[in-house]
Image: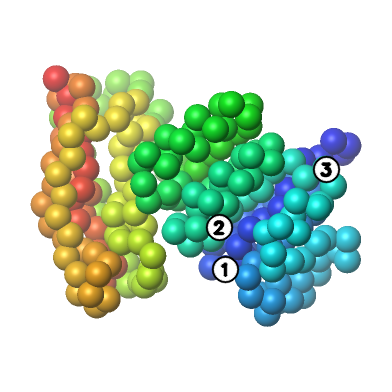
Amino acid sequence: MTNKIKIAVIGVGRWGVHLLRNFLAHPQANVVAVLDPTLERLLAVKQQFNLDENIVLTTEWQALKQVPGLTGVAIATPAITHYALIRDALQQGYHVLAEKPLTLNPIECQELCHLAEQQHSILMVDHTYLFHPAVERGQAIVQAGKLGDLRYGYATRTHLGPVRQDVDVLWDLAIHDIAIFNTWLGQLPVKVQATGTVWLQGRVEEGGSGGRGGTSRSSLGDVDISRWLSGIYSPVLAESR
């Protein structure tokens, strides 16, 4: 196929390597560059996927700007690095697929969305669970009205790790269920209440309890999240009038 989208994958760690694998297999994608700050990771993915010699492997962001015809970038780096990378990519005119969260600051998120509009570029957050067949089926059932008027939703997500140094369980885990609730309801919360608990790292919340919020109709939803125990993190929920 001609006119393939030329893509660079930025960050090939635990999740970025899956993005690379899928782009390599996609008939409309042409991976032209891979960036990671660790040379050993670059050499590992080159061997793992038998990457073509024409694919640029680099540890430097500036090197990507020299790749001819680059159309888009997929960013799977620590969340704290997202804002600067995404802003620069959009300013270069690239389309951007970013791992969640987009940034850790809502004002920065709004700025990036406005910049994407100005640049006529696509900026998309990879909420991967929204494309899971079970979630898509749930959305079809909800939107068909087969469950009637929704009043309450509940999600539990517990997992033994991974330990994240840059984000807490709200950004790392609960964000999945919040995105699912928002998509199923077709609404956004109008108020949110949450609490978190620190167990291991002294500053990054790994679980918690409590939480309630609402949209414009009248359904409530709870999200219980823990990295370590079957503890509770209830940060969001939708309430409609």
Q: Residue at x 14, y 20 (%)?
A: 241
Near mark 3 (Cα within 10 A), the count class, few <14, some 14-19 or many ≥20, is few
Q: Residue at x 87, y 38 (%)?
A: 1
Q: Position of residue 161 (x, y in %)?
A: 35, 71
Q: Are marks 1 and 3 in contact (CB under 8 Å)?
A: no
Q: Residue at x 18, y 34 (%)?
A: 191
Seen in the picture, residue 177 relative to 79 is either above or below; the reply is above
Near mark 2 (Cα within 10 A), the count class, few <14, some 14-19 or many ≥20, is many
Q: Is residue 194 left or right of residue 15?
A: left
Res 224 → quadrant: bottom left
| Lower sequence index among marks 2 and 1 | 1
Q: Are marks 2 and 1 in contact (CB under 8 Å)?
A: yes
Mark-to-mark CA distance, 2 and 1: 8 Å
Q: Is residue 134 visible?
A: yes
Residue tagged 3: 69
Seen in the picture, residue 217 relative to 84 is either above or below; the reply is above
Near mark 1 (Cα within 10 A), the count class, few <14, some 14-19 or many ≥20, is some
Residue tagged 2: 76
Residue type at tag 2: Ala
Seen in the picture, residue 163 relative to 1 is either above or below; the reply is below
Identity of the residue furthest to the left in this view:
210
Q: Is residue 21 visible?
A: no
- Camera-near label (3 vs 2) is 3
| Lower sequence index among marks 3 and 2 | 3
Residue tagged 1: 13
Q: Position of residue 133 (x, y in %)?
A: 48, 42
Residue type at tag 3: Gly
Q: Are marks 3 and 2 in contact (CB under 8 Å)?
A: no
Q: SS of the residue at dot 3?
A: loop
Residue type at tag 1: Gly
Q: SS of the residue at dot 2?
A: loop
- Camera-near label (1 vs 3) is 3
